[in-house]
Image: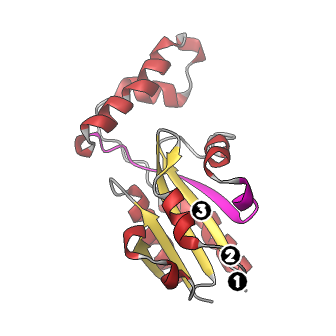
């Protein structure tokens, strides 16, 4: 089976996961900007990874255009965000908003927690990060989640949540599907 990991990464977490997945599966990881429709024809399994920004999956729309119909291919999507993927339904709504109806049953979906590298963020992303902080601050203290407290207490700091263990379910899924 020919497998490829395609990704879009702005600050490095999604790329880090792409390389970990590629290493675990013995395949290549490629930036979306380096991939064409013709390139993807040679793969049986295509994994796409994108970071989450304002409830969108970075590069995913472009990826779908390049992907074409993808008949007879195994497809997986991993999203990287700051929300703890172990929180029930944390990424379900985002996946529902971003995956067009005709693709919904084609992708196996995974969520990984990334890093908050505030020191590397663009001015726009720093401003965008104020929204969840502000929303968290407006909640009564007893209603704040662990994530709310994290945004309030660590705003403006670099936080590192990437963990190689997050890739294990995706790797197992691919291995079990390609046997």
The question of residue 10 being in magenta is answered with: no
Q: Quadrant of residue 1?
A: bottom right
Give the numbered dot on residue 178. 1
x, y percent for residue 99: 64, 53
Marks 1 and 2 in Cβ contact (< 8 Å):
yes
Residue 161 is situated, as x and y percent measured from the top left of the image, at 43, 48
Q: Which mark is residue 140?
A: none
- Image-quadrant location for residue 25: bottom right
Residue at 65% across / 58% down in the picture? Answer: 109
Image quarter for residue 178?
bottom right
Residue drawn 29% across and 31% down?
156
| SS state under label 2 | strand
Q: Which residue is mark 3?
A: 77
Mark 1 and mark 3 residues within 8 Å of each other at the beta carbon: no
Which mark is drawn over residue 74? 2
Q: Which residues are magenta?
A: 101-118
Dot 3, how many residues are within 10 Å of its Cα: few (below 14), some (14-19), or many (20+)?
many
Residue at coordinates 65% horizontally, 71% vertically from top-left?
Answer: 75
Split into 4 quadrants, where in the image is the C terminus? bottom right
Local SS, label 3? strand
Tell me where residue 120 appears, x and y as whole percent.
24, 46
Asked whether, in this view, residue 103 is left or right of residue 2, the answer is right
Residue density around tag 1, few if under 14, some if 14–19, many if 20 or more, within 10 Å:
few
């Amino acid at each position: 089976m020919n497998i490829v990991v395609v990704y879009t990464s702005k600050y490095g977490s999604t790329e880090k996961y792409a390389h970990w997945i590629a290493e675990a599966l013995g395949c290549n990881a490629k930036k979306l900007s380096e991939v064409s429709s013709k390139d993807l024809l040679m793969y049986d399994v295509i994994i796409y990874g994108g970071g989450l920004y304002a409830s969108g999956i970075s590069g995913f729309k472009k990826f779908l255009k390049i992907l074409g119909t993808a008949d007879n291919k195994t497809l997986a999507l991993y999203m990287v965000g700051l929300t703890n993927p172990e929180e029930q339904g944390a990424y379900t709504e985002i996946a529902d908003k971003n995956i067009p109806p005709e693709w919904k049953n084609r992708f196996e979906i995974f969520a990984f927690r990334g890093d908050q590298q505030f020191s590397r963020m663009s001015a726009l992303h720093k401003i965008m990060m104020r929204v969840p902080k502000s929303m968290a601050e407006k909640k009564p203290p007893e209603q704040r989640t662990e994530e709310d407290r994290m945004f309030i207490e660590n705003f403006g700091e670099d936080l590192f949540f990437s963990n190689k263990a997050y890739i294990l379910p995706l790797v197992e899924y691919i291995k079990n599907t390609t046997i």
